[in-house]
Image (tube, helix red, strand yellow):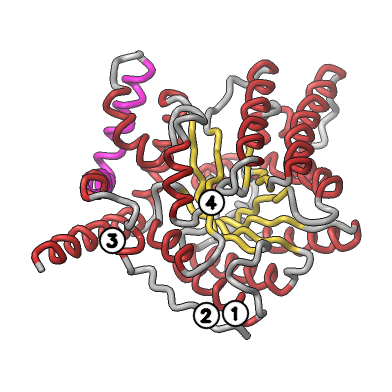
Amino acid sequence: MNPIPNVSFDNTAVAFASKSNADLYKMYLLFKSMNSNTFVKLGGGLLNAALNLHLPVKFLVKPTIFRHFCGGENLQEAERAINELGTYHIGTILDYSVEGEGNEKSFDSTRDEILRTVEKARSNPHIPFSVFKVTGLVDTLLLEKVQARQELTADERGAFERGRDRVNAICKRCYEADVRVFVDAEESWFQETIDNLTYEMMALYNKEKAIVYNTYQLYRHDRLDAIKRDYANAMAGGYKLGAKPVRGAYMEKERKRAQDMGYPSPINLTKADSDALYNDTLRFCIEHIDTIALCAGTHNEDSCYLLMQLMAEHGIAPNDERVYFAQLYGMSDNLSYNLAKAGYNVAKYVPYGPVEAVMPYLLRRANENTAIAGQSSREFNLISKEVQRRKQQKQN
């Protein structure tokens, strides 16, 4: 058993080492605002309306909430975030967060942009992963129809094959460039279609090591069973399983649809159930680390401590390439920076894209920070603590 490095997620000096006093004060104001549910809902609605009406509000959004949660409007602007994170041994996951128009031209354009992120990752050691959403490459209704086992028309079959070709083009390029890639999880009513496309890619490109990773939303009560099934299939197929467990992003939407359509909700009854399932997933992945490459996407301190403990118990070095921690850019720096300083592999999801196009993402982040009990308060309290620490340091 390896010793567990001494890591404190309350160490704000490490967490905010990359932030100037001015940066820290901006963060203080931002999270103080996001502590108010009313402000987030009202402000988000007004911002959306203003952008839809093409009112000149971009100058307000870009240097504030956009700069905090996003890398920039394009790959060139994202260099700032890549270099900043890289200085502290934190990798960047370039996440093209533009929600497409749902047509073939848009799907091709998204594929080409993802391929550009792969090329950038190929030549940059600070970019360990690429990522994409299948709904950016093929029509959502078509994915749903495939999952429902409905018969496709000839045109639909052609459209689905073009979508598969786009997925394959990205995964093949990642394999050639030796860049790992996450396939993001989405809604349950077409997730099985996404899963099956991802397993096809794993069978093609994960023979030597995990290049393609599937994402598992552990707020769904069936996802640990899915990972166990996928592990068995990987063993039988002679390839590695890439697994990125997260807690999930569509809980309210999933529950509402299940209620409206009269089927059992796929979501765990309580947060405690999701937490327990997530931690059991970490245990399973580490126990089978010879076949499973793991990226733990989590903002939960207990889960991070558990994974550190599991790695130590199984003799897995902090910098073992088969295990990564990941958080979102602009959130949970107390986890990312302290883990990286202790020698663990850490990466941040860094969204990018035009301000107007990324607004849906930004509003989800703001709502998520107020919806998750204590998340915004936790961030705000840590920032406040660091502001006070610096004041006292200056006085001394």
Which contiguous range is marked in magenta? 27-52
Nearest to N terminus: mark 2 or mark 1:
2
For the point 85% across and 20% down, which residue is it?
Answer: 153
Q: Which residue sits furthest left?
A: 395
Q: Does 387 sit above or below residue 119?
A: below
Q: CA distance from mark 1 to mark 4?
A: 22 Å
Q: Which residue is mark 4?
A: 91
Q: Determine crowd level at label 2: few under 14, some 14-19, many 20+ residues with C-alpha closer than 10 A.
A: some
Percent x, y of residue 170: 73, 35
Foreground residue among 277 and 189: 277
Q: Residue 166 magenta-drawn?
A: no
Foreground residue among 112 and 261: 112
Tag 1 secondary structure: helix
Q: Residue 43 magenta-drawn?
A: yes
Amino acid at circle 2: Ile
351 left or right of 181 in image: left
The majority secondary structure of the magenta stretch comes to helix
Query: Which dot marks residue 4?
Result: 2
Percent x, y of residue 228: 76, 64
Q: CA distance from mark 3 to mark 4?
A: 22 Å
Nearest to N terminus: mark 3 or mark 2:
2
For the point 85% across and 49% down, which residue is it?
Answer: 203
Percent x, y of residue 187: 62, 42
Tag 2 near tag 1, CB within 8 Å: yes
Amino acid at circle 4: Gly
Query: Which dot marks residue 382?
Result: 3
Query: Which dot marks residue 312?
Result: 1
For the point 84% across and 21% down, which residue is it?
Answer: 158
Q: Does 202 sit above or below residue 270?
A: above
